[in-house]
Every structure is written in C-alpha cells, then in structure tokens.
Amino acid sequence: MSAKVWLVGAGPGDPELLTLKAVRALREADVVLIDDLVNDAVLEHCTGARIIPVGKRGGCRSTPQAFIHRLMLRYARQGKCVVRLKGGDPCIFGRGGEEAQWLREHGVDVELVNGITAGLAGATQCDISLTLRGVARGVTLVTAHTQDGSSLNWQALAQGGTTLVIYMGVAKLSEIREQLLAGGMAADTPVAMIENASLPHQRECRSDLTAMEQAASDFQLKSPAILVIGAVAARATTTLWEQGLPAMTADQSA
Ligand code: SAH
C-alpha cells in the first residue's frame, strides 16, 4: 500500500459492524489516528501500528482540527500508511469531506472508506425501519448542533413527511421539540431516542414529540444518542401495519 491517508469509518460501536475494507486498512496501517467515539475493540485488527487518540479526550483542546490535519500530513509525508479512524461514517457529520479536501490540497493521496453511520445503525438495532413502506417516504439526517449557530428550516423538516434522524441532539431536546411543534408536526408523532447504539449498553427510550424532553430526562438520556422522529418510531412497527397500512406480500417479507 502506498503512502496515503485512509479516512475510515469504524461504524457505530459494535466491532462486528466494521467493513472488510476498514479491516484491511487497519491491518496495513503504520499510524492510526483515532476519534473518541470509536470502539477500541476494532484496533485488534492493527498489526503494530502506532495508535494516536485525537478526540477531545486525546489532549488536543485548542485547535483540534488543525492539529489533526498537521499530524496526518506529517505522517503521510514520512511515507507512512495513515488511517484516520472515525465513528460511524467519515462523511456523516464526521468532517471526512473537509479533511479529504485539505489533504488533497497538500498533495496527499486520500481514500475514503464507508462506515455504518450511527443513525442508521441505531434505528435498525431497535427494529425501526426508517423508510417503512407506506409510512415514510424517506429519511432525513440532520444535526442539531451547528458550528456557526445557523438554524435549520424546521418547518420544512416538520412537514416534509420523511423520518427525521437527529444527531447531537441530547442537549437540544427542548429546541427540537419547540421548533417541530411550531413547524406543524403532530404532537403525538412517535420519537425513539437511542443511546450507545449497537453497543452492549445500548438503551432506547420511546416517547412522542410533546413528551420527549420529559421522557429523556426521566430516562437520564446521555450522549452519544440519536433521535428518530416519525411514525416509524412507534414502539412496534407491527402496530402500524395493524392500523390498516398495506400488508406485505409474501415475496416482500421474504
Ligand atoms: N460520523 C458519525 C457521527 C459523528 S457526530 C456517524 O456517522 O455516526 C456524533 C454524534 O453521532 C453523537 O452526538 C450522536 O448523536 C451520534 N452517535 C455516534 N455514535 C453513536 C452511538 N453509538 N449511538 C448513538 N448515537 C451515536
């Protein structure tokens, strides 16, 4: 493998949800820069790589992104095979795009490797089908946290008819609830809040839009968690089918 940086998604936490390509990159890596949300268990695939934690707990507080950029560049220029390992997918709220661009601008070869993003994993682990036929026509991934403080178009989200999957929302439950209600979303819209998705200590809290903040507080919901908002988040999707939605034919349920 020639000297380059692999921007690799480690998936949501369960080490078995790692891709084969991610495993190959880890096996061949000389240096692995690892984010906080990555399960250390995936490092068993490394064969003697130097492991450098670069998440917030890794000690780079002041300008973390610039620091990480410089580290990647330094090792790549030394001819090392560098893996930048991120939670979930590197390009879903993971800065994969900006890191890839920056590295390419500095003459470094970059390869991106998908990971299973937490929003999709969390839903599936809780038996939520994000685009359940006849119930949701799509899914929208959003972050409740923006660096520049800019606001989402909540009305469009509330009325778009897609399932909402919200990242980084634990500290913003009040705003999310208020904005979606103000945007016209039904107060009894089901909500699922999934903490530590795919890990042995995964927890899920089901509620509805009006009660979600209280429910999360009673449940002591903590980050990392994703929110799934929409009819598909009802406790049992079988109930949705019982409510008169089209039954699956034998070949669709196969
Ligand atoms: N690139 C990552 C997202 C990073 S943003 C991905 O694709 O999954 C960090 C946010 O992701 C957290 O605040 C939380 O909302 C979500 N998250 C990451 N891992 C999670 C997990 N195991 N369970 C629930 N949410 C998770």
Image (cartoon, rainbow, N blue to C red):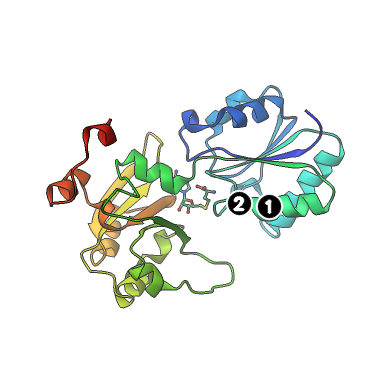
- Relative height, residue 41 to residue 242 (above, below): above
Q: Position of residue 55 (x, y in %)?
A: 61, 48
Q: Identify which residue is drawn at 33% across, 74% down.
A: 178
On the rendered structure, is 92 left or right of 237?
Answer: right
Direction right: furthest residue? 78
Mark 2 lies within 8 Å of ligand 1 (Cβ measured): no
- Point 70% across, 52% down: residue: 99
Count the numbered circles shown. Answer: 2
Q: Residues within 10 Å of mark 1 (few under 14, many from 20)?
A: some
> Which residue in the structure is indicated by mark 1?
60
Vertical arrangement, residue 79 with respect to residue 68, above or below? above
The image quadrant that residue 156 belongs to is bottom left
Mark 1 belongs to which amino acid?
A: Cys
Between the C-alphas of marks 1 and 2, the distance is: 6 Å
SS category of the residue bearing label 1: loop
Give the SS element for disc 2: helix
Which residue, as the protein is rendered here, is positioned at the far top? 47
Give the x, y percent position of residue 159.
33, 70
Residue 204's x, y, as percent? 30, 46
The residue located at (13%, 52%) in the rendering is 243
- Mark 1 and mark 2 in contact? Answer it, CB < 8 Å: yes
Relative to residue 130, is residue 74 drawn left or right? Answer: right
Q: Splitting the image into 4 quarters, where does residue 49 fall?
A: top right
Q: Which residue is mark 2?
A: 56
Residue visible at 33% across and 75% down in the picture: 183
Instruction: Give the quarter of the image for residue 64.
Output: bottom right
Asked whether residue 20 appears in the rendered view, the answer is: yes
Could you tell me the amino acid type at mark 2? Lys
Q: Is residue 166 visible?
A: no
